[in-house]
Image (cartoon, coloured by chain):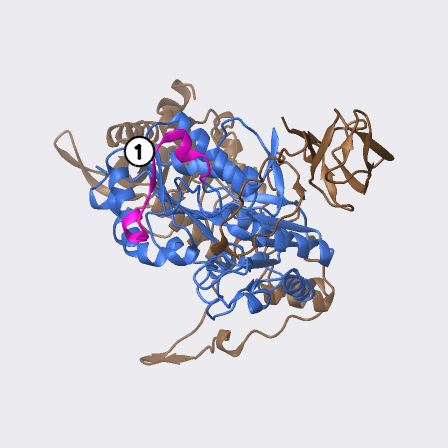
Amino acid sequence: MTNLTLIQAVNQALQQEMKRDPTVMVLGEDVGKNGGVFRATEGLWQAFGDERVVDTPLAESGIVGVSLGLAVNGFKPVAEIQFDGFLAPAFDQVISHVGRIRNRSRGRFHAQLVIRVPYGGGIHAPEHHSESPETYFVHTPGIKVVIPSTPYDAKGLLLAAIRDPDPVLFFEPKKIYRAFRQEVPETDYTIPIGKARLVKQGHDITVIAWGAQVRTAEQAVVQAKVDADIIDLRTLSPLDTDTVINSVTKTGRCVIVQEAPKTCGLAAEVIARINERALLSLEAPVARVTGFDTVMPLSRLEDSYLPSPERVVKAIKKTMEF
Amino acid sequence: MVLEFAFPDVGEGITEGELRKWLVKVGDVVKQDQPLADVETDKAVVQIPAPQAGTILKLHFNEGDTMHVGAVMVSIGEKGEKAAPEARKTTSVVGDLEESKEVLQAPEPEAVVPVQPGVFHALPSVRKLAKEKKVDLSQLTGTGPGGRITEEDVTKAGGGKPRAAPASAMIHMRKYDFYGYIDHLPFKGVRKLTAKRMVQSLYTATHVTTMDEVDVTRLVELRERWKIKLSKEKIHLTYMPFIVKAVVHALKKHPVLNAQLDEEHDDIILKKYYNIGMAVDIPDGLLVPVIKGADEKSIRDLAKEIQELAQKAKDRKLDPGDMKGGTFTITNVGVIGGIFATPVINFPEVAIIAIGRIHERPVVEDGKIVIREILPLSLTFDHRVVDGAEASRFLETIKDHLNDPALFAIDRD
């Protein structure tokens, strides 16, 4: 076993699955000869050739549309959208076709398709390169939405996503692509889609996060010196409500950390579910620490926008002292 | 040939070390085993020797860096050779990716979130009140819906008076309505319980009533004779003991009427004991004391016990135990004047019989009109368990015994 970064774990998963299953393909901008802007697809073109690793034009709608066509005809494409902000041109394909093909064909066709998207801020990138658009897709039926937060989970979840019979949007938190390493087994393993990860168990408060914000939550819990359950949602759609409810029923307090803008973000949905099923266990209103209802700022103000451990600590304290 | 020399495990199972000081620089020619660097591990400062002779091409760490075991620390080769180029990490458009040597713990198998003992439910407002009153909610038993702890539970536990119910919850008792004057009776106690039981019975069992009449002329004669005799023993002999006896005979012959339906387990429970309930009218409602083991008691015993139970019921001195364990119920509607009735089964029993008023009636017998004492009977049965034919046969057995009390002596119970 070797210590891999999250991006290396993604690369290993792609390598192994392409070797195992000849119907798996990779499509995207610069994914072939170049190996991808983040090196996620490095070595794939050399190993599997340009029939299976396809450099596409700069046309995201086309990438997803072609991938859907391939998927309906029995291939398992893994499309890469180079940056979160570039999902918008592909939005029509995802919403209007990818998420509906099973329903539209009354179950005769399905799309075994993964769309990988490096997402989120914190890397001092230009506009359209730092967005957190997960909520649009969580809101859309027919698509699963997965976000790993560790190298180990990245490999297991990506393999599960490629093998899932339905379309999966696979958001990779690019801020932590190389921020740490973890032992990742060379062996084939999957992590079930739809199951949250209990990062740490405690009794006083539940802190919920996903993607890069799991680290923020962990750091905040240490700084606040509270005995907390930390939940990494891991799959945003379908949401693992049971794990959330079990934890909040136990602790009675909850803080949710979300990088995306506040209004209508996933945190709001989690709070609604807590209200539906655990209201009578609550000791305090559920708090959320989120981005702001503004366009993601450029690099100079980025740190003011992103949830920081300090902001999360404040919310934890307020919730504990309510 | 360039050797990419990785930081070796210098002690027992160390995983990392801090590079304190390079003892060589790029371009130096080193001999085999010449010290390359001082490295501090968690145990000690050690010197890392060169694995082979050659020229230092590249130092991969700076002094003060933490090196993980297995990471390439130095490239050694021939003079003029180049260290292997570093793999490209990103292209320029991307921005800066944070990089560190931090290693996360491998994931552990996930434990299930333990369900805490003492989990309780309470509205946030109740929790706030509990905090103010310093009441430990985990120690309370909630009386609200679904065991929820209510404001009242907290106030009681805190020793304070419950807050007055809001005005909207108070019902103003008017003495009249739109059409005229009215009175109010409290709906509680026996009345309320009776109502609950009746509804449960009617909504669960399928009630069917069959009615018949029986000529009890001989029973009337028998009872008249023995009434006088037993009155010397202060026993008031009614028809009830005879009816109880007849019922027990019939239940033994038709066991499905001495039963209970357990729907949950798909089970019809046939009872091998004969506890006969007897509805007693009291001012507050209806009580049903139970004669236990009626099959083992004589007419005289039954007469005595019925008398006692009826008195206890009227005095409201029945124990709860006196009213439990019944398997079949008799209700006497004739005592006041009724003929037939459609009695409601005393759930979970499966049948009930109503006894009407014994009265003289002209009856055709062998082509002649004669005067006979007639007893009307109404049997309600739960059609889920008992069918009409079996109910009719049951009623026939009762009729046979009441028509000819000699059968009590001839047939065994």
**B374 sits left or right of B42 in the view:** left
Counting other residues with Cα less than 10 Å from the Cα at mark 1, is it few (<14), some (14-19), or many (20 or more)? few
Q: Does the magenta stretch include residue A60?
A: yes
Image quadrant assignment for residue B47 = top right
In front: A149, or A247? A149
Residue, x 59% and y 35% (percent of image)? B84
Q: Is residue B272 visible?
A: yes
**B186 sits left or right of B125 in the view:** left
Rendering coords of residue A266 (x, y %): 47, 58
Residues shaded magenta: A41-63
Q: What element carries label 1?
A: loop
Q: Is residue B360 visible?
A: no
Chain B painted colour = brown
Q: Which chain is blue?
A: A
Residue farthest toward the front in the current orientation of the protein: B80
Q: Mark 1 points at which residue?
A: A51
| Residue B93 versus residue B385 in the image, above or below | below
Rendering coords of residue A199 (x, y %): 61, 44
| Disc 1 residue type (three-letter) | Glu
Q: Does the magenta stretch include residue B275?
A: no
| Residue B4 versus residue B344 in the image, above or below | above
Quadrant (top left, top right, bottom left, bottom right) of the C terminus of chain A: bottom right
**A313 sits left or right of B354 in the view:** right
In front: A127, or A17? A127
Image quadrant assignment for residue B104 = top right
In front: A174, or B309? A174
Which chain letter matches label 1? A
Rendering coords of residue A39 (x, y %): 48, 43
Rendering coords of residue B44 (x, y %): 87, 35
